Amino acid sequence: MGGVLAFMRRHGGLIALGLLALYPLFPALDWLIEGTTGASVRLDRQLVNVYIFGLLALALNLQVGYAGLLQLGIAAFFGIGSYATGILTVDKYPFQMGFWGAMVVAPVVAGLAGLAVGMPTLRLRGDYLAIVTLGFGEVTRVVLINLENITDGPRGLNPIPEPWLPPWVAESAGTSSDALGALQLLPVYYVALILLAVLVVVFQNMERSRLGRSFVALREDELVSACMGQNPRRTRLIAFALGAAIAGLAGSLYATNLTTTAEPNTYDFNYSIMVLCCLIIGGLGSLKGALLGAAVLLGFDNVLSPLLTRLIQGSTGASSVLTTFSNWRWIIFGLALILMMRFRPEGLWPNRRVKEELHADGEGV
């Protein structure tokens, strides 16, 4: 038994990746839910949103959890990546780069926007930086609405094409291969999953690198990190730009998954707070915690909440504001945050260093 547990701990990530890769072919949970409740669900489509918000959580964790930069405008870079993808792919514009080209350019555009915002503002600290990034997020949203000639205003840019696949995949998908059929029908699922897995490996290695240690040193004590030969301003700028670029990558996937950029109001302050909630619930500065927080919040919001709404309305026979469970989500999120701050401030899967700091005297904060 001990050997099995050790194997699971050592290779749990690879096992989870394999199961998620095979899930569209064998949607066991879909069959179980439909058999027990009668509700038809497609969890593979909802999992795409979980992967995208997992990328966003990793981006914000790099800035807030690793480098200690209180950033409240991550949704702005998410929207920049989404609209960059729209401009580069829709028929309205002459670029026609397709998904793969846009997936490369959109993070670059978002990263450059992060540099442009970070260079004059990262000298600020704490609440002041939070207010500036919050303001940047709102300004970005308003600009996207008012640049109607470029962004189509409240309508958003559409249709955004799906990822291009080789012709032999499209031909085979219509024949006998279930695997190729799933790849053709849900290409963004696999692209998002692979990108998330690659970023997890990159972050795992970065934590042990000189750059990762410089982020942690900056978060713990900027003065000490400067005395040790680090350049705090450059380190902050790298963290801010990298986080913005990853958020832009998530925005590119989000727009491709929806086949539209969605309206600019989609990328409002609520998205930034939701991603921050993922880190608080999962654990600030924890790679696994960020992913767990995204899975818990998005799983509740996209899967559990609609399912409970169907069950409640099916049992009561009435459809109203009170019986729509999703209308209660912000109350539940707020209550969850209060309980986490009171009983487990380090998060569900905390960073070891943060956990030791919070429980140095044997008690929680």
Image (cartoon, rainbow, N blue to C red):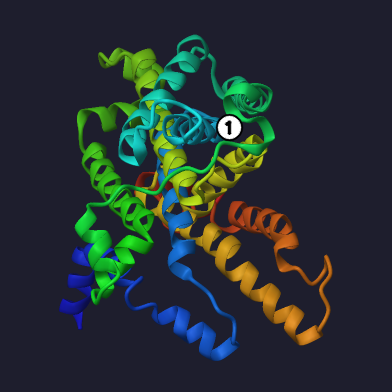
Question: Which of the 4 quarters of the picture holds residue 324?
Answer: bottom right
Q: Position of residue 125 (x, y in %)?
A: 54, 19
The residue located at (64%, 68%) in the rendering is: 305
- Asked if residue 318 can be seen in this view, the reply is yes
Quarter placement of the N terminus: bottom left
The residue located at (47%, 42%) in the rendering is: 160
Q: Which residue is mark 1?
A: 72
Figure check: 196 above or below 119: below
Q: Is residue 286 left or right of residue 147?
A: left
The residue located at (49%, 71%) in the rendering is: 42
Q: Is residue 157 left or right of residue 176?
A: right
Q: Position of residue 27 (x, y in %)?
A: 39, 77
Figure check: 347 above or below 221: below
* SS type, badge 1: loop
Q: Residue furthest bottom?
A: 35
Figure check: 178 above or below 74: below
Q: Residue furthest top?
A: 120
User: As rendered, which of 256 and 57 lies closer to the eye?
Assistant: 256
Question: Which of the 4 quarters of the picture holds residue 174?
Answer: bottom left
Q: Position of residue 90 (x, y in %)?
A: 47, 35
Q: Residues within 10 Å of mark 1 (few under 14, many from 20)?
A: many
Q: Is residue 255 left or right of residue 176?
A: right
Image mark count: 1
Q: Position of residue 104 (x, y in %)?
A: 31, 32
- Asked if residue 65 can be seen in this view, the reply is no
Figure check: 55 above or below 241: below
> Mark 1: which amino acid?
Leu
